[in-house]
Amino acid sequence: MMRGRWSLLGILAALALALVAPGLLEPYFVGILTRVLIFAIFAMGLNLIMGYTGLPSLGQAAYLATGAYTVGILVKKVGIGFLPASVAGVGMAGLLAAAFGLIALRARGASFLMITLALTQAVWAIAFTWRSLTGGDDGFPSVGRPDLGFLPWSLTDTRVFYYFVLVFLVLAVAVFYTIVRSPYGLALQGTRDNELRMRSLGYNTWMLQYVAFIIAALFAGLAGVLYAFHVGAIAPGWAGVTPSAEALLMVIIGGPGTVVGPLVGAGMIISVSEVANIFTQRWMMVLGATYIVVILFAPDGIVGRLKRLMPRRQTA
Amino acid sequence: MKVLSADKLSKSFGGLQALRSVDLEIEAGECRAIIGPNGAGKTTLFHLLSGTLPTSSGTILFQGEDITRSPCHVRAMKGLARTFQITSLFPSLTTMQNVILAVQAVHGSKFVMHRPATSSQQTMDRVQQVLEEGGLWNKRNVPVRYLSYGEQRQLEVMLALAGQPKVLLLDEPTAGLSEAERGTMTSLFRDLRGKVTIVLVSHDIDVAFAVADGISVLHMGELLTEGTPAAVRQDARVSQIYLGDESESAHA
């Protein structure tokens, strides 16, 4: 059980660090850290279909943007409360995935990547052109942040908002961990390894993948809602290639098929691009170099690499 | 009682007729071998029965029910299991996880998300039973890609049997095995006789003659003859297609 103990220690240490970090950092950095937490949720969803089910997607941004725009529009234009609007935002992302999944899951591999990308572009085009609803490329302004009601804290405080997001991240990790260890999670991994064999064991693999595709979108939708609160405004670019590609990089660099990989990946990608941004306009190049180095020395991602270094659990 | 039957089953790939109006009737509890030289249509017949290829014409009945258009996974859930010629496992998962996947499929927990896969006593009891019977219990935490080829072939059959199917379709079960491993497999199939109906597709005629109660011989996409092993062994046409005459001897 060496590995189990190491993992538990690692997780506790990371959580402790996440709890004390805002007290030690300038608000600017707390904001960056908040973005890391939000993108960790986003990348975790992608990891479910990519790392566990074997469906790398370039279309997760569609659900990020759907979650964000839905909550923005419902709060500002329709005027309903933050809580139902947020639930609707996550739900809309799931509904959109239920529709897009019917199309995208007819393909596999590179074609799946291309179709998911194409569908995202459709969402981007709607966000870009439907100015009366989304504000087009001016962006959707001043979403605001929810009021915590009877609680004595205000989410407008950067540090409070950080902890607010942290709560959702911890919940998301718990849900994710439960799913991947469940019979369903094992079935997803079986489908990733050998789809035909799964079918001949009696699994409707299409349905397994379809459900995973929707769950992944729910994670993306939640990330979108939180990101709308965090930034305060929404731009059509949220449905563009960049967030999708960033999530893909986070999963690959962190370690696909591992629970904490995307969290490490999100921290890595965002901190590298932030630091590089200080020194050069060409931060994308630094990101690319990071990617190449990780793929060369840790093809299973950073967490995948660490898992190999740990002593394996022996047969009981 | 007939458990599996094919009626005028045909399959063509473009202009090529791989299978021509084949009739097949498998009795419950029987062990039937389907043999024939390369290109006879054995593998095509296997694909049609297991549902991995669509039928061009004809019908397939399983326990009196028409399954001609049923997808693979529906047939599997009805009790029609299969193995693969090329070992087809879940390489990154452990031996135990492989068996859990096979068992939980029939225990109806495929979409259960709220509890660990190992938490169902019913599933885990069956998993342990399967692993112990197959002699792989002490390798249960080993990822299957580290098992020997013989162990992988054995696990291949164990996965198909784990769900307690009514009919087991075996695709070239002894392909690529050593003499000793073939012996182990043959005795495993002998043990299974009577417990599960077996349809075995093989061009290893020794195994077919050693385990089958009945043999169907395919040649050029058609059913050449069928009968008891003794009768088929005597059939001059069978030895001719296997041994060939002068012009085909290079091929044999």
Image: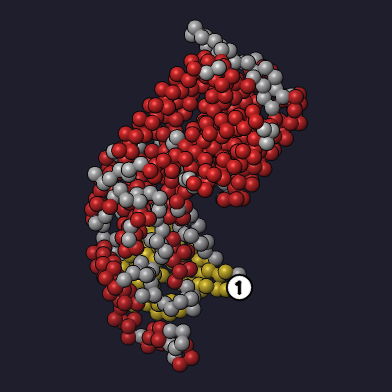
Q: What's the colour scheme? A: secondary structure
Look at label 1 and name its amino acid: Gly
Find the residue positioned furthest to the bottom: B246
Question: Which SS class for mark 1?
Answer: loop
- Whether residue A116 sits left or right of residue B11 in the image: it is right
Residue B243 placement (x, y as % from top left): 40, 86
Residue A16 lies in quadrant = top left
Q: What is the chain letter for disc 1? A: B
- Whether residue A15 sits left or right of residue B124 in the image: it is right
**Is residue A101 placed above or below A29 in the rendered structure?**
below
- Whether residue B143 sits left or right of residue A282 in the image: it is left
Q: Residue at x 59, y 27 (%)?
A: A224
**Is residue A28 placed above or below B128 in the rendered structure?**
above
- Whether residue B153 sits left or right of residue A30 in the image: it is left
Q: Answer few, some or many: residues within 10 Å of disc 1's Cα (few below 14, many 20 plus, some between 14 and 19).
A: few
Of residues B186 and B9, the one drawn nearer to the viewer in this rendering? B186
Total label count?
1
* Residue behind mark 1: B15
Residue A116 placement (x, y as % from top left): 62, 43
Residue B163 placement (x, y as % from top left): 33, 52
Residue B167 lies in quadrant = bottom left
| Quarter of the rendering occupied by the C terminus of chain A | top left
| Quarter of the rendering occupied by the N terminus of chain A | top left
Of residues B64 and B129, the one drawn nearer to the viewer in this rendering? B129
Q: Residue at x 48, y 45 (%)?
A: A298
Q: Is residue B193 visible?
A: no
Q: Residue at x 43, y 43 (%)?
A: A305
Residue B238 placement (x, y as % from top left): 39, 84
Q: Is residue B133 visible?
A: yes
Q: Residue at x 57, y 69 (%)?
A: B13
